[in-house]
Image: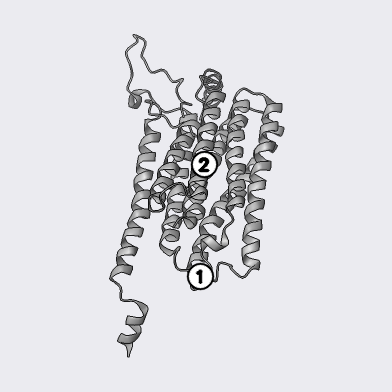
Amino acid sequence: MSAGAAIAAVDADGRPIAVSERGPASTWSMISFGFWLFLLSDIVIFSCLFATYSVLSKNTNGGPGGKDLFELGNVAWETAALLGSSFTCGLMLMSAEKKQKSNFFLWAIITWVLGAAFITLEVREFAQMVAEGHGPTHSAFLSAFFTLVGTHGCHVTTGLLWLLVMMAQVGTLGLRTMVVRRLFCFSLFWHALDLVWIGVFTVVYLGAFHG
Amino acid sequence: MADHGATEHSHEEILEIEDDGSTSLSSYLTGLGLAIILTLASFGAVLTHLVWGPGLPALLAVLAIAQMGVHLVFFLHVSATEEGENTVLALTFGIFVVALVVFGSMFIMSNLSAVMPSMEQLMRMQR
């Protein structure tokens, strides 16, 4: 995040100025840092859910474990959709920074569709598990599973709504600095969700299949 | 904020100058390529049974942490430059808290279940 890099790092005589002595930080630096702190606190929430899942993952109450319930093919498609949308989100931000409005909309729509595909796959998996009688009330393992993966799914859904709002803002306000800054925050949020998903597919899904 | 307009303007310039490759196509392509390789390696290790079973969790952990690193550097553009030092400092604290919560909980709970009498023993004690 070198968004504030344009603030002069040297004084009039070319001597370097310490960061703490360069005066107030730019709006861009403050917003990206503040949002970064929010993301870290969000990741701490996820770490609590991961810890809960790790502790409870063997407590199946006589019901099926992860190995019997999860389909790795489905998880692979979910992973591909989310990773792909993370990539197109980066391209979307690049287009926005270069003020290329039509490219922005192209990548934004692709990002949205891939994110929606991820959510569709996840909801289908959840619905199937509940329909087979393996809902969150069945065992401590399933409660922890639905809480962890469901919280991530809620975040992605929120991200999809946010992206819709951002597309509307670009449509009405154009790619002005304020809007690009919000898009930058959105891209941080979206990449962070993909980061959490790495933990989910490793700990929850792949973790259920070893041994 | 009397100079709000002026500040906005100077940031407009920053945005123009800022196109120095920090959010460049090559960075995203490198990140995507590495992420795909690491994801395929994780899934492959589980599906093919090529890796010695007891070593698998360690391999998965290494691959996941490596991929998180790839995402941080190439997608989230966390860098150890002077400007990014607050970001890195906050990230370090975040990692510390996450490790404390996850490994602390696992350690305490596994220790607890190791020293707790089993259900049958508890039932016997009740009688």
Please give the label number shown on residue B39: 2
Chain ID at mark 2: B
Residue at 38 percent across and 35 percent down: it is: B88
Colour mapping: one colour
- As displayed, is residue B65 above or below residue A170? below
User: Circle 2 sits in a helix, a strand or a loop, which is it?
Assistant: helix
Between A111 and A41, which is closer to the camera in this rendering?
A111
Q: Is residue B6 left or right of residue A157?
A: left
Q: How busy is the neighbourhood of tag 1: few (under 14 within 10 Å), some, or many (20 plus)?
A: many
Between A130 and A19, which is closer to the camera in this rendering?
A130
Q: Is residue A75 left or right of residue B94?
A: right
Which percent across, then down, holds residue B79? 41, 29
- Tell me if residue A168 can be seen: yes
The residue carrying mark 1 is A139
Residue at 54 percent across and 29 percent down: it is: B28
Which percent across, then down, holds residue A96? 62, 27
- As displayed, is residue A156 above or below residue B17? below
Please give the label number shown on residue A130: none
Measured in 3D between alpha carbons, the distance from the residue under mark 2 to the one under mark 1, in whole angstroms, is: 30 Å
Which is closer to the viewer, label 2 or label 1?
Answer: 2
Which percent across, then down, holds residue B11? 53, 23
Tally of numbered discs: 2
Chain ID at mark 1: A
Between B59 and A86, which is closer to the camera in this rendering?
B59
User: Circle 1 sits in a helix, a strand or a loop, which is it?
Assistant: loop
- As displayed, is residue B1 above or below residue A190? above
- Tell me if residue A173 can be seen: no
The quadrant the C terminus of chain A occupies is: bottom left
Residue at 34 percent across and 8 percent down: it is: A13
Residue projecting furthest to the bottom: B127
